[in-house]
Amino acid sequence: MIEAVGEGVTNLRPGLRVAALTSRAYAEYCVSPAFMVVPLPDSVSFVDGAAFLIQGLTAYHLLHTMDTTTPGKSVLVHAAAGGVGLVAVQLAKVAGARVFGTVSSDAKAGLAKEAGADAIINYVKDKFADEVLRLTNDRGVDLILDAVGKPTFEEGLRCLAAFGHIILYGRAGGAPDPLNLSALSPKSQKVSAFSLPTLTRGFPDKTREGSERCFALMREGRLKLHISKTFPMAQAAEAHRFLESRESTGKLILLP
């Protein structure tokens, strides 16, 4: 809830329900740049708003700003049971894509399946690139969303289709090794990187487009957020321990 706005802010007002992309938010009050604040429609709760903003906007813009996801396209989502992954699977299916997801356990595979993934690969049991190539008759996939980095990048290139695109938006497993760009030439492939703060800071219209589209899908029941657990603010340390355990799926929320 907005308590006050700064000089020159005309699109926000005190009393407005909002979600914000901000740091130092483990507090009763915090300050955020206006361009990183998104009004919440009445149909979206504060908990869902907190769960949506970073993951939802990231997934939307990976699929629709960094690339063009259209019917018939094939998309591989790494960490498909994570916060961004579960939203990306659903948004890709809404766009008409064939979706592959990688997960680390059978429990997480169930979540990715519920989100709509057409094929789920447990990378602990199987080499995901081999499975993708098998399932696509050696064609590979058109788009790979990769927040893992080093452990998945080279194998991703191996199962990337001609004219395919890998988008790196995180490096949970470390930064990939340096890439010889000539390796992309034979199949006319490309690799790019995405940063949500860059988009929200410089392209407010895109931020508004993504949030409005996703909120509409949530209202229609076509996009659902998975909240793994909620913790009171006093248990923030416990929430971090749970996150680091790699047992969490979807989103963790701290409640004031």
Image: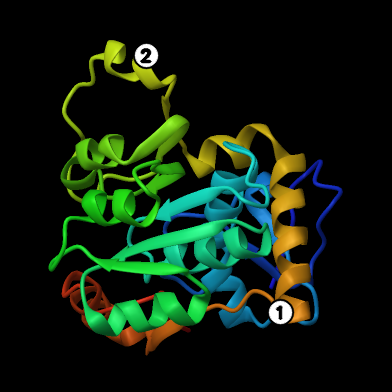
Q: Quadrant of residue 42?
A: bottom right
Residue type beneath disc 1: Val
* Residue 125 visible in the shown view: yes
Camera-side residue: 201 or 74? 74
Residue type beneath disc 2: Ser
Residue 227 percent coordinates (x, y): 45, 82
Camera-side residue: 66 or 170? 66
Q: Which mark is residue 44?
A: 1
Q: CA distance from mark 2 to mark 1?
A: 45 Å
Q: Is residue 123 above or below residue 74?
A: below
* Residue at far front of view: 137
* Residue 21 visible in the shown view: no
Q: Is residue 221 above or below residue 243?
A: below
Left/right of residue 56 with respect to residue 194 in the rendered view? right
Camera-side residue: 56 or 110? 110
Labels 2 & 1 near each other (Cβ < 8 A) = no
Task: Indicate the quadrant containing the N terminus: top left, top right, bottom left or bottom right.
Answer: bottom right
Q: Which mark is residue 185?
A: 2
Q: Tell me which residue sits at (64%, 44%) in the image.
A: 64
* Residue at far right of view: 10
Q: Residues within 10 Å of mark 1 (few under 14, many from 20)?
A: some
- The residue mark sitting in front, 2 or 1, is 2
- Tell me the colour scheme of the image: rainbow
Residue 82 percent coordinates (x, y): 37, 68
Q: Earlier in the sequence, mark 2 or mark 1?
A: 1
Regarding mark 2 in the picture, which secondary structure is present there? helix
Regarding mark 1 in the picture, which secondary structure is present there? loop
Residue 22 percent coordinates (x, y): 51, 55
Q: Tell me which residue sits at (33%, 62%) in the image.
A: 79
Q: Tell me which residue sits at (58%, 58%) in the image.
A: 92
Q: Tell me which residue sits at (54%, 55%) in the image.
A: 59
